[in-house]
Structure formats: structure tokens, C-alpha cells
Image: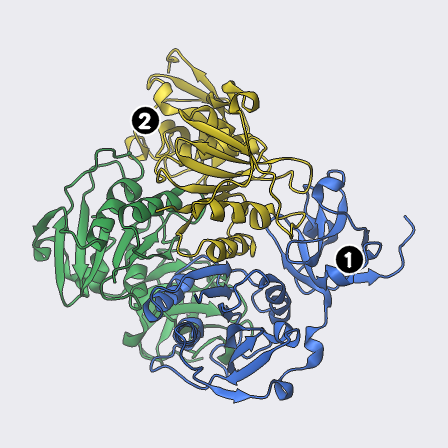
Chain colours: A green, B yellow, C blue
Amino acid sequence: MAMIITATDFGFEGPYLGQMKAVLLREAPGVPVLDLIADLPAFEVRAAAHLLAAAIHDLPQDAVVLGVVDPGVGTERGACVVQADGRWFVGPDNGLFDVLAARADRLAWWNLDWRPERLSNSFHGRDLFAPVAARIARGEPVPGTPVDPAGRLDPAAGADWPAVVYADRFGNLMTGLRAAFVPREAVVRAGGVELHYARTFGAVPVGAAFWYENALGLVELAVHRGSARARLGLAVGDPVEVLPEQASR
Amino acid sequence: MAMIITATDFGFEGPYLGQMKAVLLREAPGVPVLDLIADLPAFEVRAAAHLLAAAIHDLPQDAVVLGVVDPGVGTERGACVVQADGRWFVGPDNGLFDVLAARADRLAWWNLDWRPERLSNSFHGRDLFAPVAARIARGEPVPGTPVDPAGRLDPAAGADWPAVVYADRFGNLMTGLRAAFVPREAVVRAGGVELHYARTFGAVPVGAAFWYENALGLVELAVHRGSARARLGLAVGDPVEVLPEQASR
Amino acid sequence: MAMIITATDFGFEGPYLGQMKAVLLREAPGVPVLDLIADLPAFEVRAAAHLLAAAIHDLPQDAVVLGVVDPGVGTERGACVVQADGRWFVGPDNGLFDVLAARADRLAWWNLDWRPERLSNSFHGRDLFAPVAARIARGEPVPGTPVDPAGRLDPAAGADWPAVVYADRFGNLMTGLRAAFVPREAVVRAGGVELHYARTFGAVPVGAAFWYENALGLVELAVHRGSARARLGLAVGDPVEVLPEQASR
């Protein structure tokens, strides 16, 4: 059965996520709604796109993802529906879905030109994207115009991005690099520090900085029982560098 | 189908919201439970009442709202059930529902005099209000005594309140003013600053302060990619002023 | 009907809780999932164990609790399934379930030796414990080896612990002491301050420090409209002392 999954930058604070989910429950009764992430980087759409592409692997193949990082809400930015390897994505047409779309084997794309009767200037997640996600979850046709993804999508959008894409509350730094493509002997240079690979936190001394393959499959910079964010002085969007040859210690 | 909606000041931290929802799932199996908001202003019941009245518009007509901002828990404050324009509200009788009740076309009111066998001194949300909300969601009669709302409710409680009622995590400030009653040419004075209307964030330069109609229909004070809270130096409960004549720039 | 309940130290931030719940929804469709708590003390397994033992009382008797505080993930720590007074617990075998197990009347214990095809080094909550919790919720046998709890569990683990086990966002400090075993005339000494019993917040003046029986049944240190954490200067794991004789005021 279908499932609707939210991936937003709203935070859990305030009535925003709740109001959007109230629309989902009303328009698609009986369909489970899961909050995948509510703190996608606000204003940093590229970082959010890389994080989202890595975070969807465990989702069911028929999931409908309501993805909202929308700094341009109320301006003339477009809206879209994307189907990538079976899963649906509904949200602003601002690049949020470009990374996962460029990596998909099967891809379809619609301009979302339907508009609801009441559309606020600042909350299209509730007023536009949630009703459309509910329709798709109910099995109805996409209320939009099919377009050729080839004319819409830069094929290079799927390439890995050597930059910080997320900082968790412990100060671990996820990057836009997929660990499967980074040799274990590679050194990652970030914030002036050279980090070597370790399997996980317990494999290094307390206080040591290292990189590892995190549970999303991304290269993550970490300090055992410490904060890589504080140690390296990096924020979302800041660059990192992979040194292909092993540095001398 | 009925739906139970939580609106509290518990935060998502700790076991509080989870314990309350465990009661709902046990007592009303199969009824969806939605968290509308978990950071209603603690201790600021009037602000919470204005925010709640604005936040319920998208809720289904038969929703049962479990509303808990309860600084007087464990003292002699009463408990109530309110039905306003079809929707149910269960919680402390401390003014939290007065704004939405005073604005309702159809209104019924009960003193909630039922008490559970086990009633903690500090968590009536779990022990008293959740079981009652579950009963109502199951279609059972209200376990309370009907009272005449006219003798209970100050009719002026529904009036707009020129004050800050919520600060979101970006520092935007919601007020208790409904934007439908504020002319677009009006100037809002707050924290010594005069703010003019703009349609949305993208309509003003980065760093500019303005007011706009937010997605709840309230006048909200904002700074494009900045914090109105920091700029204006205001907190929940602080007054704002609407200048009916357009100020000279 | 069964219900799966999460109790973790993940926080609501990031994709962690969402990814784990996606597995639950996929592997146990139709089974309600409730987040009981997401901020169990990270790295402080003993404190988490006392808090969890106190927080489960309202859970249905057939609940499946997915409990994850797992600082040793990726090392050689074991994994276990525990059934205590009917309820199931799935998670790391690091002491997290020892307090509730030692207090149970009926107890069964399994070493969880099943491993999934894909097991990340850092997220056994998603890859190992969630699939097992889903199996148990579906009524399938535990994929593990039964062991005698007597050889596994220190019977003293169930004893109360005179220490701070949780600080909430208001600065109230929960302890590992069950209030039912502490006489009301007892004085609690913590951070150099002697606290007397009060029924609840409203029973003492604003600014007064006191102890009370919280809604989990634990001794909690509080300051009326203030922060006991700031007043007493204590953190999770710090000791408190019960003075059996009433101190002179």
C-alpha cells in the first residue's frame, strides 16, 4: 500500500508540519504518513538534494515523498512531480529532486500547473503539495503536464558533491560524497584537517577525528565523543577535498 | 472518521507526548492521532489561545483536539470540554479555548467533572484529558455537566489581540491580529520599528523588516533571511500597535 | 493488537528516526508505531535504563519496545530480546533493559544472533532491531537463542539509583528514585541544596526548590517557574542523597 513521506525544512516546532499532515489525513484517509526528516537544510537546496537522494533508499518502492525546501515560495518558481525508480516526489521545482532524478534508472517528470482554490503566499507545502501528494497516494492521475526530463535536468546533477550537506546534533558532518566511490585509503581534507578512514566510532580513540561510511552511505566526518563541526569549523555548504593518495601521517 | 489532534506546550522532548499518545492509542484504537503543535507558549495561555484559534482551520469538522497548556495543573483550576462549530476541544478550563469559542457560530460547553482512578498531580494531559478525548472520538457521551457558555465566556475574548503570540525558530513573530481585518496600507509598530506590508519574503530585499499575512491568516512580523525577534527585541506577550494611517516613510 | 514503540537517543533531528520507522512500516504494515521518547540520555545507558523502566507503565501489555541507546554500535556488544511482564523489548545487550527486567515478575531473554543481509556499522536500530521488532509484532518467533536470565542479569539492577537520570527542557531533574519508596518527610540533598517534598508546582512559591513525585512515579527535583538544573548545577549521572530524618529547616 502507498505511504506518504514528508521531507522538509520546517522543523518539528510550530504548527507547520502538523497543518500539512492534517491535509494529508483528510485527503488520503487510511494512508500512513511518515516524517522522514524535518530539518533538511533551509535555504541550502543543493545540500538538501544530496541528503534526500541518500536518505530514500529504505523507502518502499511506491512511496509518495512530499519534499519541501522552498525558499522561493510565493515567487515565480515552478512546482513539479517526479517519478524516479517507482517512487513519487512532489514539491518545488528548484533542484531539490535533481540529484535523485539524475541517478534514477527510470524517470518521469510533470510540471505541476494545478492550483488549489485557496493558496497562501508562504505555505505551498500545505496548500499545494500536500493535496497533490494525497491524490497520487489515492492512485489518481498527476494533475500536471508531462515534460521530457532530458530537457529539464542537467545530467551532471547526479555527481557527488564534495561539500558538507548536513550537521547532526552531535556535530557529525555528512558530505555529498557517496562512500562507495571513495577508497578506504583516501584522506579527506576538511577545515585544514586531514581525516583518515575508520570503520566506526569505537575503532578510534576518544577525541580522534576520522571519516567513515555512515548509515546513508555517505562519507561522514566525525570525532569520537566530540564535535567535528566544532573541530573543523565547517557549516553546511562548505567544501571538503578527497586526496586520492594516502597522505603521510 | 474522527481524528484526535494534540496541541500542547510539552515539546517533543521527554516522554510526555509519547505517554499521552500511548493512552490515546490504547483507549481509541484505530483512530488517527496527529500532533498539530507541541510548542504552544508555556505559561502564556492567552497567546496560546490566539494561536490555537488560528491554527485549527484546516482540521476536519469532527476532529477532537486535546489542548494542553496547563500551568495550574494540580491546583483547583477546572477542566472542560467545548464543542465549537462541530470540532471538540478537551483540556483545562483556563482560557485556552476562549478565543476560538467566542468566535464560533455554534457552541456547547461542559464542565469536565469526571476523574480517573489514578490521577497524577502534574500530568492531567495523560491521566484526565487523553481518556476523555478518546471517549469522545469513540462516539461516547461527554462525561461532564453541560453549562451555558453565555455565563462562562467573555464575548470580548474573541477580539483580536495586538501582541506577539508565537516566535518560530527563524525568529518570525506571529501576532494575535487576523490579517483579514488589517488594511494592507496599515503600518505595524513593534519594538520601536514601523513595518509595512509585503506579500511575502521574496517581495522585499534581504534584511528588510515587514509584515505579511501568514499561512494561519495572522499578521506576522518578519525579516527576509533574518530574525524579527532579534531585530525588534520582542517576546511572546509583548504588544504591537497598528497605525491606521499610513506613516510617512 | 500489537503496537511498536520507539525509545531512543536519536533525537527527532535528522533522518534517523524516520529511516527506522520506514522499516517498521514496511515490515509490519498496519501496526501502529508510537514514539515514546527520542531523547533518552546518549552515552548514559544506566540513566536511560532507569528512565525507560519508569516510562513504560502506560504501555499496552503486548507492546513491542524498540529501545536504542547504543554507544557501542559497531563493536562486539551483543544484541537481545527481552520479554518482561508480557511486553517485548528489542535492542542492544548493554544494560538498557536491565532495570525493567530485574523488576519484572515474568521474564524471558534471548540472545539476538540473527543478522540481516545488509548491516551498517553505525545504525543497528534501522538494520537489525527494527526488522526484529517488526517480526515480533507480526507474531513470529524470536530469531534468537533463549538464555537463562538468572545467569545474565544482576538481581540488584532493579534497585533504585540515587542519581539524576533526565533533565527536561524546563530544567526539572528526574532521579532514579521511585517516589513510592521515599517518605514524604524525607529531605533530598542535591548539589548542596536540601529539598523538601511538595505536592506539585502550584504548592510552593515561585522560585522555590522542592521535590515531588512526578508523573512517571519518580522523585523529581524542581523549581517553581525556574530551573533546578541551573539552581543545583547537576547533570545526568550526578548523585543525589536521601536524608531519612527530616532536616531542621
Q: Residue at x 32, y 34 (%)?
A: B201
Relative to B82, is A11 above or below? below
Which of these two is toward me, B143 or C181?
B143
Task: Give the residue type at disc 2.
Answer: Ala
Same chain for marks 1 and 2?
Answer: no
Residue A173's spot in the image, x, y percent? Answer: 42, 63
Can residue B131 be seen by looking at this rendering?
yes
* SS state under label 1: strand
Q: Residue furthest front?
A: B141
The mark found on residue C190 in the picture is 1
- Identify the chain of the residue marked 1, using the numbered disc in the image: C
Q: How many marks?
A: 2
Q: State which quadrant residue B199 falls in.
A: top left
Which residue corresponds to mark 2? B198
Relative to A1, is B218 above or below? above
Residue B227's spot in the image, x, y percent? Answer: 44, 37
Relative to B135, is B204 above or below? above
Task: Give the residue type at disc 1.
Answer: Ala
Q: Is residue A230 left or right of residue B33?
A: right
Q: Disc 1 or disc 2, which is closer to the eye?
A: 1
Q: State which quadrant residue A190 falls in.
A: bottom left
Residue B125's spot in the image, x, y percent? Answer: 56, 46
How would you rate the neighbour count of disc 2 (Cα within 10 Å): few for under 14, some for 14-19, many for 20 or more?
A: some
* SS state under label 2: loop
How would you rate the neighbour count of disc 1 (Cα within 10 Å): few for under 14, some for 14-19, many for 20 or more?
A: many
Can residue B234 be seen by looking at this rendering?
no
The mark found on residue C9 in the picture is none
Residue A194's spot in the image, x, y percent? Answer: 42, 71
